[in-house]
Amino acid sequence: MNKMNKFSLLVILIIFAVQLETNAQQDLQIIDKPNINMDGNLMTPEALWSFGRLSDPQVSPDGKTVIYGVSYYSIDQNKGNRDLYSIGLNAESSKRLTKTEKSEFNAIWRPDGKKIGFLTSESGSVQLWEMNPDGGGRERVSDIEGGITGFKYSPDQTMVLYTKEVELENKFKNLYEGLPLASGRLMDDLMYRHWDHWVDTYSHVFYCEYEDGKLISHKDIMEGEPWSAPLSPFGGVEQIQWSMDGKTIAYTCKKLVGKDATISTNSEIYFYEINNGITTNMTEGIMGFDVAPSFSPDGKWMAWESMERDGYESDQSRLYLLNLQSGEKIYATEDFDQNVRSLSWTENSESIYFTSDWHGAFQIYRYDLNDGKTKQITEGLHDFRSVSVAGDNLVATKQTMSKPTELYLVNPKDGYTQQMTFTNKDLLGQIKMGKTEERWIKTHDGEDMQVFVIYPPNFDKNKKYPTLLYCKGGPQGPLSQSFHYRWNYQIMAANGYIIVAPARRGVSGFGQAWQEQISGDYHGKSMQDYLTAIDELSKEPFIDEDRLGAVGASAGGYAVFYLAGNHDKRFKAFIAHDGIFNEEAQYLETEEMWFENWDKGGPFWEEDNEIAQEAYAHSPHKYVQNWDTPILVIHGELDYRVVVTQGMTAFNAAILRDVPAEYLYFPDENHWVLKPQNGILWQRTFFNWLDKWLK
């Protein structure tokens, strides 16, 4: 073979190798930050799904560096991916730590600060991995059958706790012998499915020794128990904590099954002693939700979030303290008529920072143990949803209606904030946002009510605009400055609509009494609040009262269904997502019965129960004879909170009454819409419907 042929062959081999590498890289299809160049300057569904979603910041032991995750989504691949980043408190930019096909999550610092532990399914199942603070030295630590769902290092770094799904024995297993393909499920009690999944397993807490980067000698501290820690469906490792001496594991659990589990919210915080295996209920006698234990650095206190009443999932979330020496329990925020979230101790164990919503915004507060007083640290229209102590500073996540979550450095002395991360700077620079305006109006019974009005980006006060009444879900909970990735005010405004969002009865952040007025009265004052808000704003010359619509999800969907039969011709279009249509059916279809018992007063068959009878008498389906306005109904098959038949029957009723209607059905979504292409279809359908009837 001559030199030319050898050279040609070598070139061919190199090209072939490069092509193989390129194909391999294409096969991996790592989802990364999209390079989006918008045609115009208005928000679109595609732009909304291009934002990086920052979450879970963790401050290093020395208080100088923060690790966090950012999720990006691929519309083509119809999924997302999450990578890890770090930033110094005084750094000008972030450093990317991972760039892999599989997401990394639950990242925390090892107590000595020399490693970062995280979870990923890179090996085929979710396992614990570690890497150096600069992202190098990536190694797998665990090899646990079936994978794990969360973990925490002990303070002395000698042990690791983790959570794992376990299967308990099926008492009907003899009926399935010789039937490996049988798909039937047999049950004899309630809570057999939850949120969007069937309850086939339980989450248990394990601990093990941690030596030389490996886990050995595993122990299930809940062995044989038919309940979960953390709480399903949304609880995470924030509900489990090591004591500062590493001798105790505190965990949140509701040790009830079946019917008892579905009618009670009474979770407890338990202490498991490593030395003797004894488990003790530390919150006995407190009947509501008790969650998120947090030990003081000096090991003398445990703080946690506590609710008072059993069965009321939206009861006030209070700061409670346990004196670990005397056993005394202290209701720390008794004079604070707000909810307490996201606890973070100061290094000297003298104060606790937390977040709370008030008047449509989440702020940072500090509780001082010495004088028992609570002080507000920040001000403004924004949502601080998490806060962590970082030396003499605070690191917090902040978002607004027009800006997704970013990290901020907060001065605890004066509340001054400085933005640390700029995850979405390029994309935000291409989008013109609408103005958000806070108003206060009088309700029909003379109360003051906050209303947010969001205007189109190129608003002209001399024009008339179609306007949407936003009906909030919950029904309890905040109506605040959240940058939502489905019910996004800015994308509604970008499509030429004014949005009216009233903080009606039931919304938190206005005192417990205001919030509780909706229980047993979905159809009463809160509905009048909606109508008062839209009537008051319709007086403005730039709102076209002949082009009004009402939209909402969940309890907001209930509101839409109810208003469809009780709006006196105000509205020209409705949209209800996963809404409650038939209250009697909802009582027997949903999985968390405590909610129905508290908010409706009890079951519909209790004829002497005046609250329940009043609630069911005003179920939206009782007014369907009045329906005459076009309605779009949206529902997901995997929604076990408000089951799919609620949406289906509402749509069927509209069609049978010759009311123009459409039904958007998702066979693979739950109470939310989580897949990119489904999310974009949702937005397109949403605005196609509104434009058809309001423009």
Image (cartoon, grey):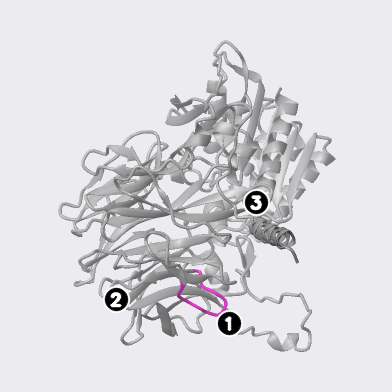
Q: Which residue is at a point 67% across and 22% down the rendered structure image?
A: 547
Q: Nearer the viewer, residue 450 or 69?
A: 69
Residue 675: numbered disc = 3
Identify the magenta region: 140-149
Do the residues under discs 3 and 2 have CB atoms within 8 angstroms? no
- Amino acid carrying label 3: it is Lys
Do the residues under discs 3 and 1 have CB atoms within 8 angstroms? no
Q: Which residue is at a point 54% across and 29% down the rendered structure image?
A: 431
Residue 190 left/right relative to 653: left
- Amino acid carrying label 1: it is Leu
Residue 246: numbered disc = 2
Q: Nearer the viewer, mark 2 or mark 1?
A: 2
Q: Nearer the viewer, residue 344 or 82?
A: 82
Describe the element under mark 3 as helix, strand or loop: loop
Residue 125: x, y in percent? Answer: 57, 72
Q: Which residue is mark 1?
A: 168
Q: Residues within 10 Å of mark 2 (few under 14, many from 20)?
A: some
The residues tagged by marks 3 and 2 sit, at their Cα atoms, a distance apart of 41 Å
